[in-house]
Structure formats: structure tokens, C-alpha cells
Amino acid sequence: MGLDEFGAGRTAVQERVEEFKSKWRERHVRSAVYGIYDRRSGECLYIGEAKWLISRLNDHYNTRSGSQVKAFVEADDGIDIDASTVWERTDVKYVSGIDGGKQGRRRVEAALIRELEPRYNSR
């Protein structure tokens, strides 16, 4: 029985549940180069590399220790993302299977930073 059958309208939570269920076949991603994007504008906010992608993304979004992404947008008057809606307004893209270990990931990361000029990467 799905959430729709309870008479509830489509909610952000339900959308996340459906998104999760649609990805169940994806294999676990360990190392990757990733980008955090504004869903509305498509702007690249941050590019990074990680040996353990899920752990690194947790560092960015963890609300217990202070979300790094939330801190970025709170300190930036030039962006229209409300810090309380960071989860809803951002999306993550990544590429995995990069040869060369950490140095290979760093090369891809550096190339993406040069090309995309993300808002919150150090220059």
C-alpha cells in the first residue's frame, strides 16, 4: 500500500521515499568526485572529492555538528537559498570509478573547479 492510498497528497517526504525506492539497484559508491548544485538555478555551489562519498556528504549536511552547506548559504548575501531549505534546494551529482586513487580524484576535482567555478570552493 502506497502513501497515496491513505488519501495523503504528494508531499516532499513522499517524493524522497519514491526517489529512494527508485535507486535501490544502484551499487554503493565509495570514492567519487561530487558537486553540490542549486536545484532551482542549476548553479554549482561546491565541488569535492571523497574516499567515502556518503560519509563526506554527511559532513556537508549533518545538522548535529552544523551543516557546512547551511553555513555557506547563511554567510552569503548573494544567494537566494534560505538556510532552512538547504536540503530541498540542493542536489548532488557525482562521478565514480576514477582511476588513480586520490590523485586521480584530485585531478578530476581540479578540472571541474576550473571549468565550473563553484561558488564555495576556495580559489
Image: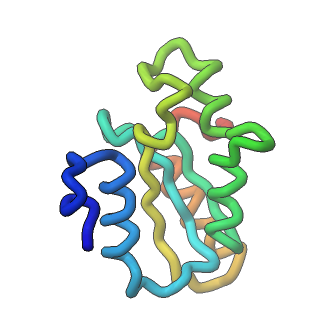
Q: Nearer the viewer, residue 91 or 88?
A: 88
Q: Nearer the viewer, residue 86 or 15?
A: 15
Q: Residue drawn 58% across and 85% down?
A: 99
Rendered image quadrant of residue 101: bottom right
Tell me where residue 25 appears, x and y as whole percent. 39, 87
Name the side, left or right, on which 48 lies relative to 55.
Answer: left
Is residue 11 placed above or below 18 in the rendered structure? above
Rendered image quadrant of residue 48: bottom right
Is residue 102 placed above or below 11 in the rendered structure? below
> Which residue is situated farthest in the front direction here?
6
Tell me where residue 46 appears, x and y as whole percent. 55, 44
Quarter holding the N terminus is bottom left
> Which residue is situated farthest in the right direction here?
65
Q: Nearer the viewer, residue 50 or 115?
A: 50
| One can see residue 117 in this view | no
Q: How many marks?
A: 0
Tell me where residue 37 appears, x and y as whole percent. 43, 45
Quarter holding the C terminus is top right
Q: Residue drawn 63% across and 68% down?
A: 53
Name the side, left or right, on which 65 lies relative to 81.
Answer: right
| One can see residue 115 in this view | yes
Q: Residue drawn 69% across and 72% down?
A: 52
Q: Residue drawn 42% across and 50% down?
A: 91
Tell me where residue 40 appears, x and y as whole percent. 30, 35
Colouring scheme applied when the structure was drawn? rainbow
